[in-house]
Image: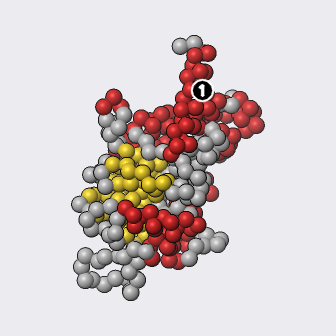
């Protein structure tokens, strides 16, 4: 392939990705309900994507968007099912994934399977489940959200599991990725993974070193998704991936994203080893052949991503 044809291919892929992203990304004040597969739906718009599992017993919700759209999120969930909202799974402490926690929880009902002691007393709101680091981040914030928005059930191991609506739901903790509290939810029977912000289709990845995030942790998370996901015929279809932001994806989308992050990271590492400053590395544009696909869609910009990777690698070098 010639350099010119390669450039045209990148531009064409960028245009296609932008068109797909535009279709799958409603306006900030608009919510769009999309079937994923099995018993699982995605509600886009109003912050991070929300994943909803419905069935004969209850409703399980992954992420609750921003507080501004919490009421409409509850309405959208009620249109999918009249069963009680039993569990809310939180993928990180980010406000665009947890802003509706309190209202969605209060719209639900926690159903105990046995008449045993409940440490929450008379509280029967839907449980909010997250890695313990999310509770620490939310409760320890400079301006913390209301306590009713905090996780009521936490885990501290590498994984946790639920069984709801005749389906196993595996919670997988990815340390030091987008943050130190990232959880992915794998709906086994429906074959759907809700990734949170470990994977997005709306730009380069964002990771927050101040909250334990790292580019290598992002790669660990992407590789974990690829370990779980099984593609369909001709590497399309199969396991469905609900990203933190953006369109419904499959294993190939995640593999392409993982390869991009790896290549750009390694290019930056080589430039750093050659003694270049951050400004020189940014001027060299190590992500240029991917900018047409990932830049300008609402996630991290190329400059932000390059700077974040450079600072992490430079810190590790010292």
Query: Image check: 243 left or right of 206?
Result: left
**Quarter location, residue 141:** bottom right
The residue at 43%/42% (across/down) is 249
Question: Which residue occupies the foreground of this view, 279 or 88?
Answer: 88
The residue at 58%/31% (across/down) is 15
Q: Position of residue 163 (x, y in %)?
A: 27, 63
Q: Position of residue 268 (x, y in %)?
A: 63, 34
Q: Is residue 108 visible?
A: yes
Above or below, 224 relative to 134: above
Image quarter of the C terminus: top right
Q: Is residue 261 visible?
A: no
Above or below, 290 relative to 169: above
| Figure label count | 1
The residue at 73%/38% (across/down) is 278
Rendering colour mode: secondary structure
> Which residue, as the protein is rendered here, is positioned at the far top?
2
Badge 1, how many Cα within 10 Å: few under 14, some, many 20+?
some
Q: Position of residue 175 (x, y in %)?
A: 47, 54
Question: Which residue occupies the foreground of this view, 318 or 87?
Answer: 87
> Which residue, as the protein is rendered here, is positioned at the far bottom?
122
Q: Position of residue 272 (x, y in %)?
A: 67, 34
**Quarter location, residue 58:** bottom left
Above or below, 20 relative to 209: above
Report the residue marked by disc 1. Answer: 11
Question: Which residue occupies the foreground of this view, 14 or 276?
Answer: 14
Under circle 1, the secondary element is helix
The residue at 43%/70% (across/down) is 128
């Amino acid at each position: 392939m010639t350099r010119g044809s390669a450039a045209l291919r990148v531009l064409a892929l960028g245009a296609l990705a932008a068109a797909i992203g535009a279709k799958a990304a409603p306006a900030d004040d608009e919510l769009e309900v999309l079937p994923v597969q099995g018993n699982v739906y995605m509600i886009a718009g109003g912050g991070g994507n929300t994943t909803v599992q419905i069935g004969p017993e209850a409703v399980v919700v992954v992420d609750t968007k921003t507080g501004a759209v919490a009421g409409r999120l509850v309405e959208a969930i009620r249109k999918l099912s009249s069963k009680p909202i039993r569990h809310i799974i939180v993928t990180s402490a980010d406000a665009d994934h947890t802003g509706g926690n309190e209202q969605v929880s209060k719209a639900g009902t926690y159903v105990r399977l046995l008449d045993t002691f409940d440490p929450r007393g008379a509280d029967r709101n839907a449980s909010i489940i997250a890695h313990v680091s999310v509770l620490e981040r939310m409760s320890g914030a400079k301006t913390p959200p209301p306590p009713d928005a905090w996780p009521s059930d936490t885990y501290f191991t590498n994984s946790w599991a639920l069984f709801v609506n005749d389906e196993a739901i595996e919670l997988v903790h990815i340390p030091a990725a987008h943050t130190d509290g990232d959880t992915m939810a794998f709906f086994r029977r429906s074959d759907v993974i809700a990734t949170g912000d470990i994977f997005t289709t709306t730009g380069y990845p964002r990771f927050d070193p101040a909250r334990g995030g790292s580019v290598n942790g992002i790669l660990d998370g992407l590789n974990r998704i690829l370990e779980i996901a099984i593609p369909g015929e001709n590497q399309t279809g199969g396991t469905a991936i609900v990203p933190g932001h953006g369109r419904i994806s499959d294993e190939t989308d995640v593999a392409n994203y993982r390869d991009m992050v790896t290549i750009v990271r390694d290019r930056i590492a080589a430039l750093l080893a050659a003694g270049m400053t951050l400004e020189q590395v940014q001027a060299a544009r190590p992500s240029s052949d991917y900018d047409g696909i990932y830049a300008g869609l609402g996630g991290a910009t190329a400059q932000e991503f390059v700077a974040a990777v450079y600072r992490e690698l430079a810190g590790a070098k010292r």
